[in-house]
Amino acid sequence: MTRRFARGASRVAPFALASLVVACTGGDGSAATANSSSGSALVASAAVSEGAPADVSRVLALREAEQRRAASLVGEPDLSDRAAIVRRRAARALARIANDASRPQLLRLLADEDPEVIEWAAYGLGFRCTDQKEETVAALVARAISLSDDSALDPAIAAISRAVGRCAAQTSEATLVAWLDGTPVRAGAAALALGDLAQRTKRLREDTLVALLGKAAGGVSAPPLPEALYPVFRLENVAPSVQARLAEVASQRLGEAGPFRIFAVRALGRAQSAGLPGLERVLIGGDLSFTMPERVEAVRAALRLGAAGHILLTKTLKKLPSKGDAIAHADVDTAVLLALLAALRETTAIVPELRALAAVAAPADATPRQKRIVSLVRCAAATLVVVDNPADPLLVACDPENGWVGKRARAEVLGKSKLDPAELLIFRELVSDTDVRVREAALEILGTHAELPGAHDLIVAALRAPEPGVAIVAATQLAKQPSLASERKPPKKLPGAPKAGKTQLPPGAKPEAEDLPPPSKDAIDALTALLERGEREHDLEMLGAAIDAFGALGQKTLSPKIERFCSSVEPTAREHATSALSLMTGKKPTCEGPPRDEEMAPEALVKEDAPVKLVFESDAGTLAMTLDRMVAPVTVARITDLVRSGFYDGKIIHRVDPSFVVQFGAPFGDGYGGPPDRSALRCETSPQPFDTLSVGVALAGRDTGSSQLFVMRSRAPHLDGDYPWIGTATGPWEAIFEGDVITKARVED
């Protein structure tokens, strides 16, 4: 789950090199040949709640290895220690280090007899399976064959299967299809693993799809396997020859409530017209058992079906609430309505209904929250009606409070308009608004309207903005449109092109560096300052955005500004630097980091202990989550401390995807940043699945998590292992709408 998010400051020791990354994947370290020293501050200060004294010492040393991302601190004695807890923590550390140096050790631990050790070893091998794919998959398959059907081994079997899928070796698909005929646990794991494979390769063989549909349908000797529909909707397109069968099987699974029914709903969108009856059943069939996430996914699936899908969506719209009091009630129907308005593309047949929604009045006694929710509906409908006229009275009046909801809607419409002089005035009002979310929405217009008068000056000013999100958005738009860095407009025709030919660049294409007007000194100075700020404040997303912008300029003379990040301790910094330097020099560099991080976050000293319960009072009611300090001790310590410090009090819940996640914890409520006085955390990822109400840490790349959390609204296998799972939530999380506020957070002792 991608997320926008920055890094704070303060580590155990002063921060030496700048840092950044792109997801919880990758990393570098030196070969593991020696034991770690037991005299570190971590070993001396921390404690764990299990094991004999000697075991505790090793466990703490292995925690240090994990936090320093140093495979060299995991030694041979750790891999063969008689205490299972030591071998488990060695496997966990190596799985989270996830670099070339850890691979041989993980292969060694894969042969262990302890189920948890096997699970961690398999997960780590699949986490970064870039080289030696065939050899890795062969080892995983051999270990799976050797394991019995003991239920205690189920998690290990699941981890092995997922690793085979993630490695995407030539033998992965055939292996996983064969495993579909195993026990229910092995078959379910194989089905999810085929989804991992489909996500990476973008295809599955037709006979694989047939096998999956057969398992999803079930039979006399085996019950249906609903997980088998997961790989199908991970594909963008499904072969026409199986679409009718897909629709038949997915429709059958609609009758069985459970965490995997949403897979059937999503799969119907890949069945083309054959999937329409099933989606109609979910949306307007009158079956009240379908959950809000399932109905929202049916809306999105219908969008894939072209004109027939839009006809279904218009029918659905007419059955959803259209009165202010019903919308303000903010129930499931309101969430589905907002999702539908976001999905609609063809609106000719429902303009009267949309106009009515755009003008619907909130109840006279509506609370501020209810007024905001009504405005969300009004403005979503208005943007569909006015199309590209940001001055249309219907749009201007859609948010009676003149708040961020209405202003952001106007920015969305501006992005689709030609921006005449009158509209330029609106743009300038929005780009200077006091709400950072509005300013960011306006700045995003520059990515498609680089020709705007004064665009260069606006970008330069935004790069220097004190709010991290504003500066990051500016750098991101500059990376999309490098001509924004110049005070001169880019040429309308490419140099040397025939006068009679079509010389305009195709949509989405970037001009070559030599075709761009040179960047101004002001732009270079502002980008340099942003680069230094990201490094100084340890804001990894800011740093990455600045590196990307420099790369997009394509100026070889600017490469020295980026070269030092090629050896950063942070994997994502190196990834950004690799890409940027390739653009700037025309050669792909080899960016390798140091063998270990010399610094650690202060929370690395905490002990693994009992779970901690957090309570959040919000506009939607009392919410709670229980965090697992055994799985993610450092992350849980960070979040708990932030709650105690009052960091979450008054924070806006900035992201609500009705069928996916609720996300919060950004200082400015815009999805960017974390606490400015905290360093980012090492990703404590695990094989733990992301189920409904799982709690995870939002990331902008590997090792960038800090304060932003997300709570799942449905099962999401594609997040498994890539984001830190830290606990489970309770309470009315399904009732949250965008803009709701956490008024108070506390730790329940």
Image (spheres, rainbow, N blue to C red):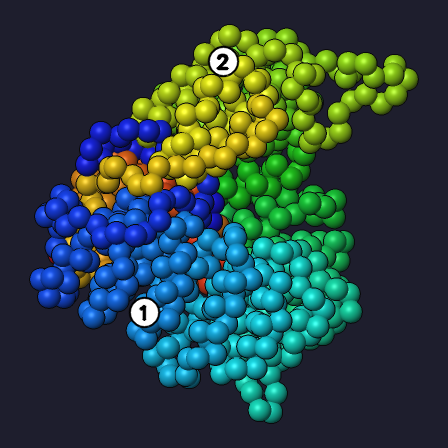
Residue 524 - label = 2
Disc 2, SS: helix
Task: State the residue at coordinates (17%, 48%).
Answer: 37
Closer mark to the observer between disc 2 and disc 1: 1
Measured along the vertical axis of the image, is residue 159 above or below residue 438? below
Q: Is residue 590 left or right of residue 63?
A: right
Q: Where residue 72 appears, x then y in whole percent?
A: 30, 49
Measured along the vertical axis of the image, is residue 292 above or below residue 247? above
**Amino acid type, callout 2:** Ile
Using a 10 Å C-alpha cutoff, classify the residue at mark 2 as few (fewer than 14 neighbours), some (14 to 19) or many (20 or more): some
Q: Where residue 213 appears, x then y in whole percent?
A: 65, 75
Q: Is residue 613 left or right of residue 188?
A: left
Name the one closer to the observer, 146 or 525: 146
Question: Would you identify the image quadrant in which residue 295 lies?
Answer: bottom right
Task: State the residue at coordinates (14%, 50%).
Answer: 38
Q: Where residue 276 appears, x then y in whole percent?
A: 70, 65
For the question of whether residue 552 can be seen, the reply is no
* Residue under label 1: 116
Quadrant location of the C terminus? bottom left
